[in-house]
Image (spheres, grey):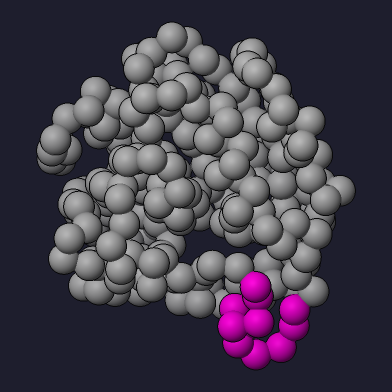
Amino acid sequence: MDHFLDQDSYGPGLITVHHEGLPIDIRHDPRGFPTTTVFFNAAITNPKLRYPFFSGVGISELLPTDRIHVHDPSLYLDDDLKLAWYAGSRKQNLLQEVLPQILLALLPAGQRVVTSGSSGGGFAALYYGTKLPHATAVPVNPQTSIARYNPRIVARYAELAWGVTGGDPVSRIPAQLDLVEIYRGPVQNRTWYIQNTGDASHVDEHMRPFLESAHADNDVEAIFVDAGTGHVPPPKEFVTKVLAAAVDGSLTPPRA
């Protein structure tokens, strides 16, 4: 980590920062644009995918943005761990503080910043969007409070990443797992929150508590899309359209 931060510049390609025994893998693609978009992965459930895996590569290829794609280092802990929200583990209990240092080192001065991710990656986009200067967070169907998510998946993360078992595991994990509390206070970033209206559990358990409790001064806009029943992402074309507006610095997002 110290060696990485001591560098004067960072070229394109795969960057691996070794921190507390785990690699933090980043695909760095500086292309000379005035905006950098940071992409975070959703749950990785396809057993054929090899690590590190970087989402958002295809959707952003034609967008006028530099790109940073981050693989969640906690997934290296156990093959059965598919989602960790970029919230760290017992080996990297300060990941939520360390990763912003890495991202800030990679961002050119004065860059417009967009953070993007779906589902668990949407949680990361919202969280790390508050850590980067004047970022626009574009989460898609995000979790906003891990305690409200699927108990089986949360319990797996608690046990495999933190060694925590038993009831109410989230309360015993030393990481920030509740974005509702963060956005209850004022934050500098703006948020374009894309939500499939047919995803009932995420609408009721994640979107509504987040929007209802957000501080009045926070710049948060909900973008509703009817993409079908369940935890289904909106069409790629629409998400690309929203990202393009964020990359361009538009004041308002497009609507479905």
Main secondary structure of the magenta stretch: loop
- Magenta-span inclusion, residue 177: no
Image: 28 above or below 32: below
Residue 80 location (% of width, % of height): 76, 58
Task: Give left or right: position of 177 versus 213.
Answer: right
Q: Nearer the viewer, residue 111 or 252?
A: 111
Image point (72%, 28%), residue name? 6
Residue sitting farthest toward the bottom: 167
Image point (42%, 29%), residue name? 37
Residue 45 location (% of width, % of height): 64, 49
Residue 32 location (% of width, % of height): 43, 9
Quadrant of the frame with the N terminus: top right
Image point (73%, 51%), residue name? 75
Q: Quadrant of residue 182?
A: bottom left
Q: Nearer the viewer, residue 180 or 42?
A: 180
Q: Nearer the viewer, residue 179 or 222?
A: 179
Task: Give left or right: position of 220 versus 240.
Answer: left
Image point (79%, 30%), residue name? 3
Image: 238 above or below 130: above
Image: 6 above or below 167: above
Q: Is residue 227 visible?
A: no
Magenta region: 164-174
- Magenta-span inclusion, residue 171: yes
